[in-house]
Image (spheres, rainbow, N blue to C red):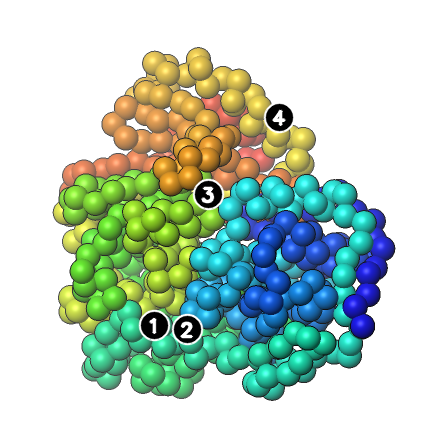
Amino acid sequence: MTKIVATKPYADQKPGTSGLRKKVPVFAQENYAENFIQAIFDSLEGFQGKTLVIGGDGRYYNREVIQKAIRIAAANGFGKVLVGQGGILSTPAASNVIRKYAAYGGTILSASHNPGGPDEDFGIKYNIGNGGPAPEKITDAIFSRTKVIDSYRTLETPDIDLDTVGTLKVGDLTVEVIDPVADYAALMEELFDFGAIRALIASGFRVVIDSMSAVTGPYAVEILEKRLGAPAGSVRNAEPLPDFGGHHPDPNLVHAKELYDDVMSPEGPDFGAASDGDGDRNMVVGKGMFVTPSDSLAIIAANAKLAPGYSAGIAGIARSMPTSAAADRVAEKLGVGIFETPTGWKFFGNLLDAGLATVCGEESFGTGSSHVREKDGLWAVLFWLNIIAARKEGVKEIVTGHWAEFGRNYYSRHDYEAIETEKADALMAELRGKLATLPGRSFGALKVETADDFSYHDPVDGSISSKQGVRILFEGGSRVVFRLSGTGTSGATLRVYVERYEPDAARHGIDTQEALADLIAVADEIAGIRAHTGRTEPTVIT
Ligand code: VG1
Ligand code: CO
């Protein structure tokens, strides 16, 4: 029944920040997905007879690739596959299943916050046995393998029934179709005070979650409506759709604007949250207050002890380099370690495994902890509800109180999407070439203290990741950071991250873009964004 199929390599299968992402028509090319999956297995050792977890965010092409992945896993000698019913597993739920059942690893089919549909995006990523994204050593090996692959192994077998929970055989492989929600919901009950949150909701505190027609719908309905007692309909867009209802499943002020407007309206709910395509991102909005992801990390860390799963305190905080330094001040006060990593969750894995960090976060609406090895959207939402219930304060009071205690890090990210790759590369090259000349130079009232291209030395395994983003630091703690996205599927996206620290509570009420205006102007002056790209405005501001 095992078949060896001859194939030709594709040159473009380099995994980015989080797996391989391409348009569906690219993935649908002959043997394209098969090549990549076989290349993953060819880069691993010792998985014979072991368990592989497979699941995805339900987007267009999910089911087809799951069928392929199961056949290829069977033909390569895995002993068992755990697959979410209907092919569904959110990214954090998959991470949990890998850990809970001590699987060898897992493949998660998702392009995360990118749109889905026949002409939109699809993706595959591989997670290792700790439940986290494969480190660069493995993604580099996978890419090398894709460049020379000449065959893959598969099994000739009819389509596997993914819709019935239970166990079946595919050749020698045992396939267990599991409830995608149960293990995850049980974990959340262990970490958070569901009794207190239930009481908060019963007292009339109104919570809404927008699942953006993506994977978190079934998870949010089970947890928020069934276990925490929120009224039916509190979870909006709860059914995962292959094209996410034509929306962009990216929880930010642009794509989740409806939810934001609703929470901000006087008669709207007290608390709103949204997640992305694969459920690892979160956006949190309270009455009168949007919480920036960088602040969310800092506030969760500062209040961690209020949640039962973290009552013993946290060991340390890790944040990606472009994420604001708000968390650094919390770490300092708590007397715990703070780690600055490159963008992408894979860099947190070692710190979490080594017990150096307990909570981690990225400015891109990603927060998580040692409970799994991925960022986790609903986890962050539940953490916030737990904090609100324990402190008996609303989001706005909690955030402004935090600023008053620690100071405020004004923060914004400006994205310039779909720039021609050559132009983006030229901009970055010129900027890198300039770095040595910047320290000491003044731009209006801003004087450059240091300028470099971020390089990360992993304190656990000693690996070095260089060229992870250009950062220009000004005297007084303000900074601008430039990097190119590693998750896009067409052209290049330039991300410009801007931050200013304001210790004075009397100056905490300024509009963010206004508070950062001089830095935004200097970013353009230094990098020549207009000159290189012709763009006068960012595509998305978050
Ligand atoms: C973006 C974010 C990064 C995040 C990554 C994956 O990467 O900036 O913080 O880890 O997406 O998130 P990039 O390279 O485009 O800046 V997800 O939810 O898309 O898996
Ligand atoms: Co995601």
Secondary element type, mark 1: helix
- In the rendered view of the protein, which quadrant contains the N terminus? bottom right
Q: Is mark 3 within 8 Å of ligand 1?
A: yes
Residue 298: image location, x then y, percent: 27, 50
Viewer-closest of 79 and 126: 79
Q: CA distance from mark 3 to mark 1?
A: 26 Å
Q: Earlier in the sequence, mark 3 or mark 4?
A: 3
Under mark 3, the amino acid is Thr
**Earlier-in-chain disc, 2 versus 3:** 2
Nearest to the eye among marks 4 and 2: give it: 2
Q: Which residue is mark 2?
A: 184
Give the amino acid at mark 1: Met
> Label 4, on which residue?
426
Q: Residue at image x 41%, y 73%?
A: 184
Q: Residue 439, percent across and down?
A: 37, 16
Of circles 3 and 4, the one toward us is 3
Q: Is mark 2 within 8 Å of ligand 2?
A: no
* Residue type at the position of mark 4: Ala
Is there a contact, CB below 8 Å, between mark 2 and mark 1?
yes
What residue does disc 3 label?
Answer: 343
Which residue in the protein does label 1 denote?
188
Residue 89 is left or right of residue 376, and the answer is right
